[in-house]
Structures are given as C-alpha cells and as structure tokens.
Image (cartoon, helix red, strand yellow):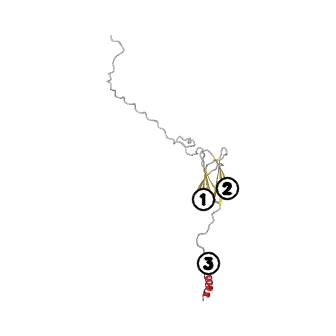
Amino acid sequence: MPLRRILWSPLALLLFVAPIACLPAAAQDSPERHGRKYKAPPATSHIEVTVLKKFNGKPISNAAVIFDAKLDGKDQGNLEVKTDPDGKAIIDIIPTGSTVRVQVIATGFATYAEEYLVSEPSREITVAMIHPQEQVSSYQDNEGKAATRKPGVQEPIRPTKPAAKPAPPAPAPSTTPQQPPSTSDNTPKQ
C-alpha cells in the first residue's frame, strides 16, 4: 500500500491542481469583464504662435500667450505660455477639432484676442502687435463734440467750479488806542 500511495498522490495532485491553475486563464477569455475600460486620449494638434511687432516685424519675447480651448461646447481649460526670444509660443495638447481663443498680452502693446477652429494636426498663427490706440467711442461730451481723451491711463475729467471769493477779513482789534481823526485843514488861520 505504501507504493500505491506514492504513485497515487502525484497523480491526484496533478488532477486536482491543474484545473484550478487553468481557471484564471479561462476567466480572461470570458466576454464579461469588470473594471475600467481603456479610453484613448483625443488626438491633439501642434499650435505655434509667432508674436511680432507690427511696425518693424521683430519678435516680442516674454509675451504671454493664453490658450482657452472648447471642444463640443465643453470647456477644456486654459493654459498660458510665454514666448521665447524668437517670439514663438508652442503648445501640443489642444484637442483637434476644438475652438481655441488665443489671447496675447505684451508690455507696451494693445492686447490681441482671436478665436480659431483647430481642425488640422498642425497650425501656425502669426500675430502682429500694435501700440495702444485711442478708444473709439460713440459717446460725446457735454458740448456736443466728440470726446477728446487720449490713449493711455488718464485721470477722469472733473468739472471745475469758480471758487467763491472769500469775504475780506475783519480788521483785527489793535492794542494801541486810536486817536480821533483830526479836523485840521491845510488852510492857515487868521
């Protein structure tokens, strides 16, 4: 009997352990799966914005380029990228097919903003920055003339009122006694 036990135990072990070892492999092939499914990220576009001075065509370095993306009406967030010494700001994470508002802010220049539909895998945008201009207004001042404010930061115009003249000061009382006015004439007496 001991020999029988020795032969029978490896065979029993093989018959009982082998189906248990194969269970995880069979579970992977089953159509029912639990857990999260992999969802590939959307395709992205390569956007390169070049910022130049309009009057001489030289690049503007360290200008802030703000990207505000919307895809199918859903906000995708916004990002700010500074331009390099060549005036270029590059971004590679904007989803293809989205609408992007590009806003450029540079010291000494008027702010630029424009919306673009990014439907291609690569897009180059050139922005020519100008100096601030006088504001165009349909309002008029009180005299019916167009407003004459100049561009830049200014103090508000305040109406000037003529100052009321103060009353003359009352004479201060003196400490010396006053003499009555003399009634002397310059005519000699006879």
State the mark number for residue 21: 3
Q: Is residue 26 above or below residue 99?
A: below
Q: Residue at x 68, y 57 (%)?
A: 122
CB under 8 Å between discs 2 and 1: no
* First in residue order: circle 1 vs circle 3: 3
Which x, y percent locates residue 44? 65, 60
Placement of 166 over or under 12, stated as above or below = above
Q: Amino acid at mark 2?
A: Arg
> Which one is in front in this view, the residue at disc 1 or the one at disc 3?
3
Residue type indicated by callout 1:
Lys
Query: What amino acid type should be assigned to the residue bearing mark 3?
Result: Ala
- Secondary structure, mark 3, is helix
Q: Nearer the viewer, mark 2 or mark 1?
A: 2
Nearest to N terminus: mark 2 or mark 1: 1
Question: Could you tell me which quadrant the N terminus lies in?
Answer: bottom right
Judging depth in this view, the residue of 11 and 142 nearest the camera is 11
Q: CA distance from mark 1 to mark 3?
A: 51 Å
Please give the residue where the numbered disc 2 appears in the rendered image. Answer: 123
**Label 3 crowding class (10 Å Cα cut-off): few <14, some 14-19, many 20+?**
few
Residue 53, image x, y percentages: 65, 46
| Residue drawn at (66%, 54%) of the image | 48
Distance from Cα at disc 3 to Cα at disc 2: 55 Å
Tag count in the figure?
A: 3
Q: Which residue is under mark 1? A: 70
